[in-house]
Image (cartoon, rainbow, N blue to C red):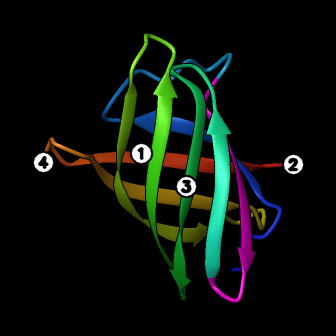
């Protein structure tokens, strides 16, 4: 379940509409269950995250700059799922800082 060097694209989110032609792309790195990475895509110009993995659970804190201007930050917990083809999926529950509205997103691993 190590996430080191794995890349994902967002396929759905309750926080925004995902552009299938240019979804948000995530790159993960992991060493000794410490996880970090970056992301960019349809609503985000640049984003960074850091956290930990415990088994099939990933807990991170994130911050990103928005295409529309401004920034967003928050915390999330993801469940790692293995697909039949061996690729991973991340099912993420998250909330933005200053807003207690719960959201869910799904990211799929890409080559």
Of residues 69 and 95, the one drawn nearer to the viewer in this rendering: 69
Structural crowding at the residue carrying mark 2, measured as other residues with C-alpha within 10 Å and reported as few (<14), some (14–19) or many (≥20): few
Residue 8 image point, x, y percent: 69, 48
Q: Which residue is mark 4?
A: 100
Dividing the picture into quarters, in which one does residue 72 lie?
Answer: top left
The reply to whether the C-beta atoms of the residues labelled 3 and 1 are less than 8 Å apart is no
Choose mark 2 or mark 4, whichever is in front: 4
Is 65 a magenta residue?
A: no
Front residue of 69 and 53 = 69
What's the distance in space between the residues labelled 3 and 2, CA to CA? 21 Å
Q: Which is the main secondary structure of the residues drawn in magenta?
A: strand
Instruction: State the residue position of label 3.
Output: 49
Q: Is residue 93 above or below residue 52?
A: above
Q: Nearer the viewer, mark 3 or mark 4?
A: 3
Q: CA distance from mark 2 to mark 1?
A: 20 Å
Judging from the image, what secondary structure is the residue with disc 3 in? Answer: strand
Circle nearer the viewer, 4 or 1: 4
Quadrant assignment, res 98: top left
At 56% from the left and 18% from the top, the residue drawn is 19
Q: Earlier in the sequence, mark 3 or mark 4?
A: 3
Q: Earlier in the sequence, mark 2 or mark 4?
A: 4
Q: Please tell me how crowded label 3 is: few (under 14), some (14-19), or many (20+) other residues with Cα within 10 Å.
A: many
| Magenta region includes residue 28 | yes
Sequence-wise first label, 3 or 1 = 3
> Viewer-nearest of labels 3 and 2?
3
What span is in magenta? Answer: 23-33
Q: Gap between marks 2 and 4, in whole Å?
A: 34 Å
The residue that label 2 is drawn on is 111
């Amino acid at each position: 379940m190590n996430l080191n060097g794995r890349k994902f694209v967002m396929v759905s989110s309750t926080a925004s509409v995902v552009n299938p032609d240019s979804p948000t792309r995530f790159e993960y790195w992991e060493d000794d269950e410490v996880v970090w990475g970056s992301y960019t895509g349809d609503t985000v110009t640049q984003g960074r995250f850091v956290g930990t993995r415990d088994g099939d659970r990933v807990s991170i804190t994130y911050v990103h700059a928005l295409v529309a201007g401004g920034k967003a930050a928050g915390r999330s917990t993801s469940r790692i799922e293995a697909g039949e083809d061996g690729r991973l999926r991340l099912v993420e529950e998250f909330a933005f800082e200053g807003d207690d509205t719960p959201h869910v997103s799904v990211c799929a691993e890409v080559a």
